[in-house]
Amino acid sequence: MSSTTISDQTGAARVEGAAKVIQPAWVRIMHWINAAAMIAMIMSGWQIYNASPLFDFQFSRNITLGGWLGGGLLWHFAAMWVLVINGILYVALGFATGRFRRKLWPISPRGVVSDLAKAATFRLSHADLSVYNYVQRLLYVGILLVGVLIVLSGLSIWKPVQFQALTALFGGYDTARYVHFAAMTAICAFLVVHILLALLVPKSLRAMIIGR
């Protein structure tokens, strides 16, 4: 076997190995940072909510973080900075690398309806994890938009005087709290679906840990 043939085979093997990477390192790292920060924010947010409930219920102390209002606020703000910085870097890299364009576009109503029907009858293929189906695309784009909404409504609640124009855009401080709660609920629902899908398709969880 000639050295040229060996070189070609080695190059092909390298290309094949590279093609098997489903989730690049930067995606995996930011995903787990985001997961930890999001859980801390949700649990501390429930602690803050309990100090002044919007509805006729409170969250169990077993699933809150901070122990009291002041502690909840400290955890919430600490996780907030991690989440915002990580989120900005993730979105910037998503656009810069073309990942968002490749993974999340296009989205068509017909494609979403078709994939929802397949998912409901357990016929939705997960053979190629590098390609997102239409339902995944819609969910990921939607959660990115919800992320923007929860940050803006959170700023309105945190600094209603300094960001009074933003607070007014939400209809005032009290309304901003309801928007913030609704966005949090949407994120929790997304996390539940996300975790269930990871359990149903274990290789997707493996890809988010080792990349393949």
Image: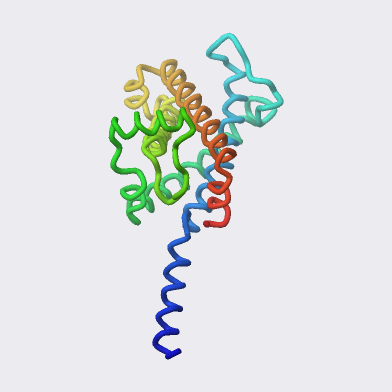
Residue 158 visible:
no
- The percent position of residue 77, horizontal first and vertical second, equals 54, 36
Q: How many marks?
A: 0
Residue 73 vs 88, above or below: the answer is above
Answer with left or right where residue 159 lies relative to residue 71.
Answer: left
Q: Quadrant of residue 168?
A: top left
Name the residue at the bottom extreme.
2
Q: Quadrant of residue 105?
A: top left
Residue 24 vs 36, above or below: the answer is below
- The percent position of residue 96, horizontal first and vertical second, equals 33, 55
- The percent position of residue 131, horizontal first and vertical second, equals 40, 48
At 63% from the left and 28% from the top, the residue drawn is 70
Residue 30 vs 74, above or below: the answer is below
Picture quarter with the N terminus: bottom left
Residue sitting nearer the eye, 192 or 16? 16
Residue sitting nearer the eye, 6 or 95? 6
Residue sitting nearer the eye, 53 or 196? 196
At 55% from the left and 42% from the top, the residue drawn is 201
Residue sitting nearer the eye, 208 or 4? 4
- The percent position of residue 72, horizontal first and vertical second, equals 62, 30
